[in-house]
Amino acid sequence: MTSIYNFIVEPLGETYNNKIKVEDKNLILNTKVEKHKFVNNYAQVVAIPKAFTTPIKVGDIILIHHNVFRRWYGMDGKQRNGKAFFKDNLYFVSIDQIYLYKNKDTWKSINNRCFVKPIENKNQFKSQKEERLVGILKIGNKSLEELGISEGDLVGYKPYGEYDFLINNERLYCMKSNDIVIKYEHQGNEVEYNPSWAQSG
């Protein structure tokens, strides 16, 4: 079973991460299946495409776009799978829907994706808890390295290009290399910002 242009994957866990345990009961957090925040973004690779080669192998864990497992309701009110659904518990994923892969213990970016962690806002006169458009590069890529921007660097990035993911209990912003616009010198007082809900996730 192999696709020509797409990866075939299965969800790592359920297709939605929308339940928390409260004593002996499960509490469902969302009221609509269309809400992307609760769709599972983690999958395991079952088959790789034949048309091209990537470093991703069968069995790897990948971080994917929230639309892959998302379900929706038709005009008849019945719940349906999205267009990525293949059969049973398997889904098609294109290469541009994959942001990270992990075949051992380390997450690695694919193509031009990178991940930035925001830092705490030090300005006591602002209500925002994190500094806007500034963060620490946590997962970089080759194109950024060629520009002298490495993991651990303090960077500035464009607005509206960042999307948050929960990775190893850290909220990180996913963006593309060209969303990184500047490399700052560390001042020495930067503190990474991680909301409490991410740490308990």
Image (cartoon, rainbow, N blue to C red):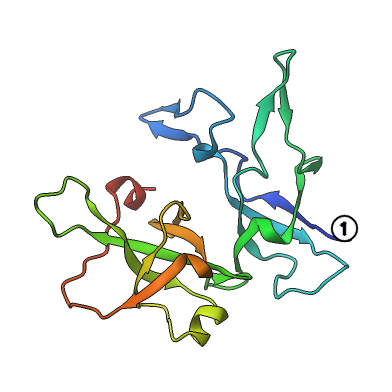
Residue 113 image point, x, y percent: 56, 66
Q: Amino acid at mark 1?
A: Ser
Q: How many marks?
A: 1
Please, which residue is most extreme toward the left here?
124
Assess disc 1: are there few (<14), some (14-19) or many (≥20) residues with their C-alpha within 10 Å of its C-alpha.
some
The answer to whether residue 71 is above or below residue 45 is: above
Residue 33, position as x, y percentages in the image = 58, 28
Q: Which residue was labeled with disc 1?
A: 3
Residue under the point 17% across and 45% down: 127
Which quadrant of the structure image shows residue 148?
Answer: bottom left
Q: Observer-nearest residue: 189 or 17? A: 189
Q: Quadrant of residue 74?
A: top right
Give the residue drawn at x 80%, y 40%. Answer: 88
What x and y, as percent, mark residue 95? 72, 61
141 vs 32: above or below: below
Direction from residue 52 to residue 196 in the image, left or right: left
* Helix, strand or loop at mark 1: loop
Q: Residue at x 59, y 70 (%)?
A: 112
Q: Using the image as rendered, state which of residue 197 and residue 185 is in the foreground.
A: 185
Q: Is residue 1 above or below residue 181?
A: above
In this rendering, is residue 141 above or below 31?
below
- Residue 29, how many percent across, how many down? 44, 29
Most foreground residue, 157 or 33: 157
